[in-house]
């Protein structure tokens, strides 16, 4: 077990100084360089950082999610809560900054940031010029400068399609929303739809007429797209649908219920997120569980790593997902 004495021996600082630092003694007067060297030494030796009571760094959570988005999609509230929890465990003091506040409102004592939501290249260039270390959760316009953490949507799409194919389905559809690109001011194909298209095309089963996507990721959008799909396809409906959000899927299920489409008998459904709503819709959703806690933890760990061990390269981490099987689709076997 690594002790304070071991850290003192390697770092060159006294056990008294290190002990006071780790206990969070506010009367201790040391430079930030000294503090960082002690922390780096402790981490390199494998010291349990949860034993350290002092705040290691102050970071900003750039929460570029509107109140409207929070109301429509509980996913982001879970992300926010888990970032608070894991930052506290990592002895990081954090402040939340909204899009309305802007990146220029970041206080001078901030050493790094975690961004949730879509930041522009201009905003990220500013952060880079200021010398901040950062992690982007999601789409990263400057991956050469900042770390990226995102769910592995390609793997989810690949698995969903293989599950459907194993059932003998050949008419496989998609119902989802679009990505609004702040740089172009236009709606574009979302990354989940792109992954779906890529893997379905590889299987030779891509058919444009079974793909319906527009607008935002809301219950109403899913409902309206289902009505549109039925109106355009009539009896030639897909045998299975991959839906990139439980929120949209809830609207799809309601639309199917009103149209007399039996899920999963007439159309199997796999969605993404495993939000609370997934358990309580009818039928309950078979969905890929995105581990929000793991995403938050990974964001915090990557930023902590950058702050302790400065590096010139950026990293990208993909977070896998587990299929939670409920009644909207029950696969015969694993893929």
Image (cartoon, rainbow, N blue to C red):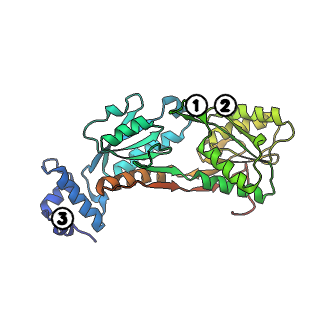
- Name the residue at 63% across, 32% down: 215
Residues 176 and 185: in front is: 185
Q: Which mark is residue 186?
A: 1
Give the CA distance from mark 3 to mark 1: 53 Å
Residue 51 locus on image (x, y percent): 28, 59
Label 2 Cα crowd, 10 Å radius (few <14 / some 14-19 / many 20+): some
The reply to whether the C-beta atoms of the residues labelled 3 and 1 are less than 8 Å apart is no
Instruction: Judge depth for marks 2 and 1 and give the one in front.
Output: 1
The answer to which of marks 2 and 1 sits earlier in the sequence is 1
Residue under the point 48% across and 37% down: 118
Q: How many marks?
A: 3
**Which residue is depicted at the point 14% across and 58% down?**
17
Q: Real-space Cα distance between discs 2 and 1? A: 21 Å
Quarter of the image for residue 164 reads bottom right
Labels 3, 1: front one? 1
Viewer-proximal residue among 318 and 189: 189
Q: Is residue 130 above or below residue 154?
A: above
Q: Would you call the spot at circle 3 few (<14 residues within 10 Å), some (14-19), or many (20 or more)?
A: some
Where is mark 2, residue-wise? 220
Measuring from the top left, give residue 135's x and y in whole percent.
41, 47
Left or right of 16: which side holds 250? right
Secondary element at image label 3? helix
Q: Which residue is mark 3?
A: 11
The picture places residue 207, in percent across and down from the top left corner, at: 77, 45
Query: In the visual, does 159 lie left or right of 305?
Result: right
Q: Residues within 10 Å of mark 1 (few under 14, many from 20)?
A: few
Dots 3, 2 in contact, CB < 8 A: no
Q: Secondary structure at mark 2?
A: helix
> Distance from label 3 to label 2 (Cα)?
59 Å
Residue ID at (38%, 55%): 313
Image-quadrant location for residue 1:
bottom left
In the picture, the quarter occupied by the C terminus is bottom right
């Amino acid at each position: 077990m690594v002790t304070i004495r071991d850290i003192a021996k390697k770092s060159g600082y006294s056990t008294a100084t290190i002990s006071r630092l780790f206990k969070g003694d506010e009367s201790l007067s040391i430079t930030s360089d000294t503090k960082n060297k002690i922390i780096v030494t402790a981490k390199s030796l494998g010291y349990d950082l949860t034993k350290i009571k002092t705040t290691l760094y102050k970071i900003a959570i750039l929460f570029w999610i509107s109140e409207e988005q929070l109301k429509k999609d509980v996913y982001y509230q879970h992300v926010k809560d888990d970032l608070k929890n894991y930052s506290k465990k990592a002895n990081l003091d954090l402040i939340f900054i909204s899009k309305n506040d802007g990146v220029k409102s970041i206080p001078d004592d901030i050493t790094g940031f975690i961004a949730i939501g879509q930041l522009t290249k201009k905003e990220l260039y500013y952060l880079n010029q200021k010398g901040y270390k950062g992690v982007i959760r999601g789409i990263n316009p400057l991956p050469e400068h900042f770390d990226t953490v995102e769910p592995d949507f390609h793997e989810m799409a690949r698995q969903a399609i293989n599950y459907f194919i194993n059932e003998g389905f050949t008419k496989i559809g998609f119902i989802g929303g679009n990505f609004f690109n702040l740089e172009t001011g236009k709606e574009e194909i979302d990354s989940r739809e792109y992954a779906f298209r890529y893997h379905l095309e590889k299987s030779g089963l891509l058919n444009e007429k079974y793909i319906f996507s527009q607008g935002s990721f809301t219950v109403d959008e899913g409902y309206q797209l289902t009505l549109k799909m039925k109106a355009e396809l009539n009896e030639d409906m897909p045998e299975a649908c991959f839906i990139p959000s439980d929120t949209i899927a809830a609207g799809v299920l309601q639309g199917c219920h009103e149209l007399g489409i039996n899920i999963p008998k007439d159309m199997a459904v796999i969605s993404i997120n495993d939000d609370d709503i997934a358990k309580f819709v009818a039928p309950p959703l078979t969905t890929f569980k995105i581990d929000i806690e793991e995403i938050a933890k990974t964001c915090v760990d990557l930023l902590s790593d950058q702050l302790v061990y400065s590096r010139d390269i950026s990293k990208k981490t993909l977070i896998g997902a587990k299929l939670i099987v409920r009644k909207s689709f029950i696969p015969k076997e694993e893929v």
